[in-house]
Image (spheres, rainbow, N blue to C red):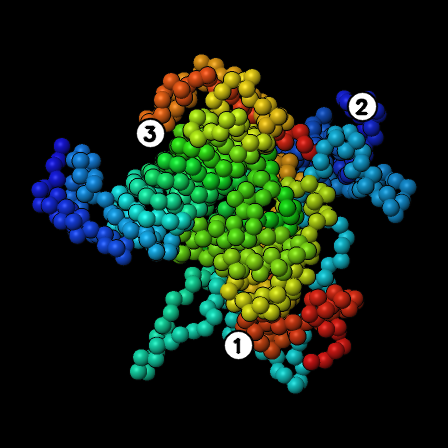
Amino acid sequence: MVTAKARRSRNTRVPVYRPSDFKWVNDRERCARCKRCVQQCGFQAITWEDGPVSDPSKCVGCHRCEAFCPQSAITIQPDPQYFRPHPLWTESHRRNIWLQAETGGVLLSAMGNDLPYPVLWDSLLLDACQVTNPSIDPLREPMELRTYLGRKADSVDIDWNNGSPKLAMEIAPMLEIETPVLFAAMSYGSISLPAQKAIAMAAEECGIMWNTGEGGLHPDVKPYAHRAFVQCASGRFGVHAEYLNSGAAVEIKIGQGAKPGIGGHLPGEKVSQAVSETRMIPIGSDALSPAPQHDIYSIEDLRQLIYALKEATNYEKPVSVKIAAVHNVAAIASGIVRAGADIIYIDGFRGGTGAAPTTIRDHLGIPIEIAIAVVDQQLRDEGIRNQASVIAAGGIRSSADAAKAIALGADAVAIGTAALLALGCTLCQRCYTGRCSWGITTQDPALTRRLDPYLGSQRLVNLVHAWSAELEEILGAMGVNAIESLRGSRERLRCVGLDRMTADILGVKPAGVGA
Amino acid sequence: MREIPPSAVAKASADRAAGANDKGEIATRGERRGRHSPARNDNLENMRVRIDARELHYRELNQRVREAVAAGERAFELTNVNGQRYIADGIRGEVKFDIHGVPGNDLGAFMDGPTIVVHGNAQDGVGNTMNAGRIVVHGHAGDVLGYGMRGGEMFVRGNVGYRVGIHMKAFRDRQPVVVAGGSASDFLGEYMAGGMLIVLGLVGMRPGQPIIGGWCGTGMHGGVIYLRGEMGSLDSTLIASQFATAAPVGEADCDRIRPYVEEFCKLFEVDRAAAFEPGFVKIAPVSHRPFGAKYAA
């Protein structure tokens, strides 16, 4: 079996050697010759020549064929080609150079940063109660995870009204969510309609929020719009007055953790009839989102759009601003709050994407752990922390990560990759091809119909319920009965193995230092 | 045909006489009958809601407009407008606005259907992400006009500023059109994805002033820009040649632009013959997928 092939580039006429990523192994003794693997592969990597034959150069390692082989005859293995090891010229650098020498193109990736940067969550530990402060049993005591997102008043005016007090002020519009875990922004176009519908239904059932991304609102998910952030980004796809008013909140997308500072290109191949109608652009045309919003070149301009959106929605919806976590994130966040945003959504450098240049995805931005800490601190120092809620996203893998994010100062977290994993994603990172065998990041009807939105929704609901139950356990162990008591409580975090400066920036003491 | 009962006209006139007072309060009418009858236009003057915007914060002004629209009002006359932002922002349906003064930024943003006539200059962000409707400016307009505009028409008598028509797009019967009587500045039609931009260079031009600024059509991948003039007189270095090319117009192009240029001439009482001489240059995208080959995937 050929696992690598010599190619001849049209332009350079230099023989190119580019090995495959994976080796596809079929146990011929077990194979029932049912052809299911051929049908299941979205990448046409398996053909039938008196038995299944693979083209390893096309295999992305998504494991769809393996999962659906009734005989368990298939195994996907790392390509056995052995390169002489080199600590500097790693295999991935070599592969990338060969590919670029062949194509002259910008490397493309999907999902989140896959380089081994330190994961700060794994250096943070939560406190627990022992003897001197009793823990709380979540099986016996009610635990409060409900969270309100939006602008909180500086003070509360009450009309005492002779013993029957009433609120004597207007409260800014706020989102009530049952657990501080939301679904991240993923547009219809980047993901399939069944995938978005599964997410929207799960958000409704869990009493949380989903986010349209910059893809408009398809009629099938409109019934769930009352649980949606509707996004307004630089391409303004599908954005109109009715759309803005159908969501629970409006979000201005400035940036994304996987690709801070750059725009988005939804390739024409993914702009199907239905995507075209939802984005309100012609079928097959590239959906180009410019890098900045060209009506926003400053905080003042951002304020102008925030208030344009508030005016268009009669001041009834909170306005969120989504940014990527970058070096100056604290000052930027301060500007965003002062510009009138009710929610800041910060996406760390490990955040996912349907398509991003690999170089951008892997080398720009800062960790979300740091971003939460510095933003929370800056807003506190300025006395404006109450004026906006902070949603943290970009590599939240578990309820523990969520709890640590909230302890660092986030009001809630958003999950994108984790949600897609719940739907069956195996993190093959080839969303940008539009060929997802699992029906998640494709618009090919033959592939999208593989994903049942109702079953998918149930899996997402399970995930959110499981994380919520774990959050309750964590709160109980920490001796508090409301997520509000953990929020911004860095005293309940300790770090291990971090340098002093990083610990200081996080505002977290080293393990071993008492209260 | 259904006539408005005399009583209704009398009532409206009486309200009109009572008028919007100097605090800008809206004159309200109890009688709504006959609003959709052909007689409506004859009585439009009487049917209009007048708001004096002097000293009014935009939020209060726009709140009043929204409430009046919700109550069924369909015509407004806003006087003494002096920089108030977001007028007609997000308003849907057939509503008419006559604006006297200078409206502030984001005039008609996200609007879906109304007609706005500005008797003066307009500022930045006119028709931002506008879905449908019409905006007529009897003066100059500022930067970022028609950003993400998806439908409707805009006629500006004089110049338009920088970044006009960025990411303008078309969808089915929605074909946005902007006609500017003067010049446009840099980045005209950047990332343009659909619709039509027409620049006439006819009104308020300085001698030798180019009709457009630089980087025209950067990232353009749809739609078309028409500039009045001859190929020879257009400075081709102003056009982002990687994305867009200039060519003389054909017969089909002339048919496309004629109704809009004629409308422009009618609206602003400009000599029709001058507007069509010496012809037009067409700027069209090189590719509908300019970044299709950018990636190594």
Image check: A493 left or right of B120? right
Q: Which mark is residue A12?
A: 2
**Residue A468 image offset from top left, x and y in percent:** 56, 64
Front residue (pair A269, B287): B287
Question: What residue appears at the point 48 percent right and 55 percent down from the top-left corner?
Answer: A319
Mark earlier in primary sequence (1, 2): 2
**Residue A78 image offset from top left, x and y in percent:** 79, 42
Mark 3 surroundings: few (<14), some (14-19) or many (≥20) residues within 10 A: some
List the single residue furthest toward the left. B6
The residue carrying mark 3 is B267
- Give the residue type at disc 2: Thr
Compute the Cα span from label 1 to label 2: 71 Å
Question: What residue appears at the point 50 percent right and 46 percent down from the top-left corner?
Answer: A232
Q: Which mark is residue A141?
A: 1
SS assignment at label 1: loop
Circle nearer the viewer, 1 or 2: 2
